[in-house]
Amino acid sequence: MSRISLIWFGAAISIAEILTGASLESLGLIRGLVVIVLGHLIGFLLLVLAGIIGVKNREGSMRSSARSFGIYGSFFFAALNIVQLIGWQGIMIFDASLSAQGILKLGHTWWCLIIGILTIAWIMLGIKNRDRLNIIVMALLLLLTIILSFIIFSGVKSGETASQGAGEILSFGQGLELSIAMPISWIPMIADYTYKAKKPVKTTFSACLTYTLASSWMYIIGLGAAVITHETRIDQIMLKAGLGVAGLFIIVFSCVTTNFIDAFSCNQSTFALFPKDNLPQESEGILHNIEVNLPGIIDTVIGTAGAILFPMENITEFLYFIGSVFAPMISVQIADHFIVKHGKKEVKIDAVASTAWILGFIIYRILMKHDFLVGYTIPNMIITIIITVVLRKLTDKVFFTDLGLRKNRI
């Protein structure tokens, strides 16, 4: 497994993924598994397409969005991505703190501070030190996750997999949407890691596949724990599985490795707001690393404060917000890059792309009021792609017609 794939494995080993899988309990084990597999297959395809758009342009995700939306348009999405990254930092730290508190009672605030400090320390390690430690931590997380999976699913017996409906009752389409939403949240970040690779397309595919498989696994653990043991609290799942200290390790370091990706992408999105080619790179110097990673450090500090001050138990609406913002965004980019071959980065704001995104955002929010078997994301993306293609064709036709008239007048 390459260094980048290892990073994305760490992104998927996440408390949030397990909790989202557990929220599918009302679907039952079989339908829940179908939803997880289908949702992650769709998410995998979208991640790959988003990654390829970035690597083909040799730019990070937010800078690459300028080719569709214009320079100021890319600033808008970079700012929205920073907002979602701060939100994810807070949610991840909040969930990990509650779970850790269930195993070792130090207090919610103390656990938030510990996880936040560990995240900043992980950011500050530097590439070489972080890569070495990452291999050790990922190996331990993999081993412990395998043990956790075995303990949970060894309890499968006849009659134990029936849905209890203890939580919110979800339809198939709603469950599918929650399964797609988590991969979509990484769309604004995937190219940040792969566009500089020696074999960027291959690296993108490998990273996306690694994330998809590991994320599906986490969802399945959450679903299995909820349906089989009827327990959705991570700390109780760990304790019932006999994973005391080991469970605490999973909770804390799965949060740290995922939050690191958020922090790194916060760096990239912040730098995307400043159109310079000479972006700073990590080195072994501590002061230089602080300068390079300052946006990510600030992101972590704000997220930690948010986790301490605000309740963040329910992330469903947050996932839907992410879907409504970034599903239309990637739809416009897919239409521009793969269908109409549009890519004028020099414009400040692209009116066609902006109009298509606004319509896509509104349509997504309208679709949310209805229950579709395929969820909201797929219909929304198809409609937004069609809108983008039609608007591009119409504006091109008007432009060339007007140009022809001007030539005739001359």
Image (tube, grey):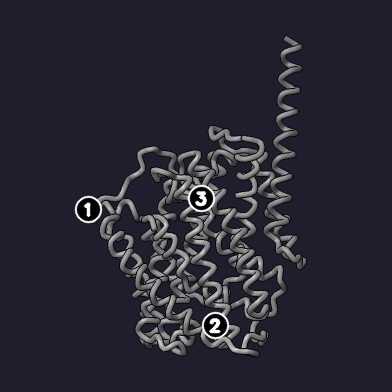
Nearer the N terminus, badge 3 or badge 1?
3
Can you give x and y, in whole percent of width and height, for residue 325 in the image? 61, 56
Residue that appears at 48% across and 50% down: 204
| Amino acid residing under circle 3 | Ala
**Residue at the left extreme?**
285
Nearer the N terminus, badge 3 or badge 2?
3
Label 1: which secondary element: loop
Residue that appears at 48% across and 74% down: 15
Label 3: which secondary element: helix
Q: Which mark is residue 12?
A: none
Residue topped by disc 1: 285
Label 1 Cα crowd, 10 Å radius (few <14 / some 14-19 / many 20+): few
Q: Is residue 108 above or below residue 141?
A: below
Camera-nearest label, 3 or 1: 1
Residue topped by disc 3: 78
Nearer the N terminus, badge 2 or badge 1?
2
| Amino acid residing under circle 2 | Ala
- Residue 317 appears anywhere in the view: no
Can you give x and y, in whole percent of width and height, for residue 216 in the image? 54, 68
Quarter that holds the N terminus: bottom left
| Amino acid residing under circle 1 | Gly
Quarter that holds the C terminus: top right
